[in-house]
Image: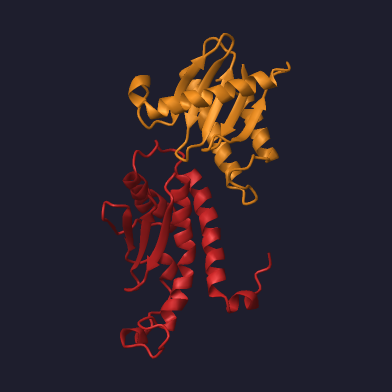
Amino acid sequence: MIVCVAVVGHQNNPLYIQSFTEADDALKLHHIVHCSLDVIEERVNNPKKSGTTLNEAFLGLLYPTVNYKVYGYLTNTKVKFILVTTDLDVRDTDVRSFFRKFHAAYVDAVSNPFHVPGKKITSRTFAQTVSNIVGSYGLN
Amino acid sequence: MVFDGRFYANKPELAARRIEAIGYQVGHQLSERYTMERPRFSDHLEAIKFICKDFWSEVFKKQIDNLKTNHRGTFVLQDNKFRWLSRVSIDPSSENETEDPSTPGESKAAQAVSMYLYFPCGIIRGVLSNLGIPCAVSADISSLPTCSFVIRVKA
C-alpha cells in the first residue's frame, strides 16, 4: 500500500507531499522523504557504485527501512518524485508504471499558467489525479 | 496587467523584456512536457541537440538546419526558414546604406523584425534554464529568411 508520494524541486524544495494513511504518521513520512533526497544525490553523483543505468529517470529502490520501501525518480529538469510504500513484494513494472502516470500528471500541473515554478503545487486536479493513480496502483 | 498599446509604444526595451520573460515561462513549461519520455542529458551538447531536433520539431514542425559551436560555451542554431518570420517582408532598402544616422547599418525594418524574436529567444532560454543550463540567447537576422539563435552558456 502506498503511504506517501512527494515531489521535490531541483533545489530540494518541496513542491508536493501527500500521505495516504489513517495514522498520524505524517511527520515520520516527511522525514523519510527528506532522507531519501540524500540517497538520490549520492546515486546521481556516483553512478558506477549504484549499478543503475546511467541517465535513466527511474532510480529504483532507494533504501528499505524496517516498515517501508522508498522508490525514487529523477526527471530531466532535476525534479524528484519519491514513493513510500509498505508493500513487502513490489513489482518493478508497477512502480515504473506508477511513476510514468505520476510524471504525466506533474507535467499537466506545471503547464498551468497560474502555477509559479518553484512554489508548491496547489492544483486540486493534480491532487485528485494523484489519488486516482495511487488507488489504481498494483491492480493490474 | 493591461497591455496598453500606448504604454509600450515608446519603450521598446520594456516590451522586449516582458515578451522575453513570457517566452521564458513558456519554454520552462514546454521543456517539462517534451523531456518527459527521455533519459537525462549527460552534457550541454546533448541538451542543445535536443533543442535542435526534438524541441524544434514539436514547436516549429521542423528541425534546426545547422548547429555550430566553439566548444567553449557558445552555440549558434541556424534556421534557414524560421516559421514565425516567414511572412515578414525583407526590406529592399536594407541592402543599401541606411539613411538613419543614429543606428548605422541597421534599418528600421530590421529593428521591427527583431522585436518578434524576443519571444523565441525567451523560449530557448527557458528550456535550457530548466535543464540546469543558465545562458543568454540572442537572435541574428543579418540574412533573412535565415534566422540564427546565439546561445551563450554562463560558466
Of all residues shown, which one is farthest toward the front? B155
Q: Which colour scheme is used?
A: by chain
* Up/down of A93 relative to A11, above or below: above
| Viewer-proximal residue among B7 and B148 | B7
x and y, in percent, of residue B105 in the image: 35, 82
Question: Horizontally, is B7 left or right of A62 in the view?
Answer: right
Answer with the quarter of the image where residue A122 lies: top right
Answer yes or no: is residue A139 visible: no
The chain painted orange is A
Question: Horizontally, is B11 left or right of A74 in the view?
Answer: right
Answer yes or no: is residue A127 visible: yes
Chain B rendering hue: red
Question: Horizontally, is B21 left or right of B86 in the view?
Answer: right
x and y, in percent, of residue B132 in the image: 44, 44
* Up/down of A129 relative to A24, above or below: below
* Up/down of A58 relative to B45, above or below: above
Give the position of the N terminus of chain B as an image quadrant. Answer: bottom right
x and y, in percent, of residue B155 in the image: 37, 49
Q: How many labels does the image show?
A: 0
* Up/down of B85 relative to A70, above or below: below
Q: Residue at x 55, y 12 (%)?
A: A65
x and y, in percent, of residue A118 in the image: 59, 43
Q: Residue at x 39, y 66 (%)?
A: B139
Q: Which residue is drawn at 44% across and 55% down?
A: B124
Of all residues shown, which one is farthest toward the bottom? B99
Answer with the quarter of the image where residue B25 lies: bottom right
Q: Residue at x 33, y 69 (%)?
A: B146
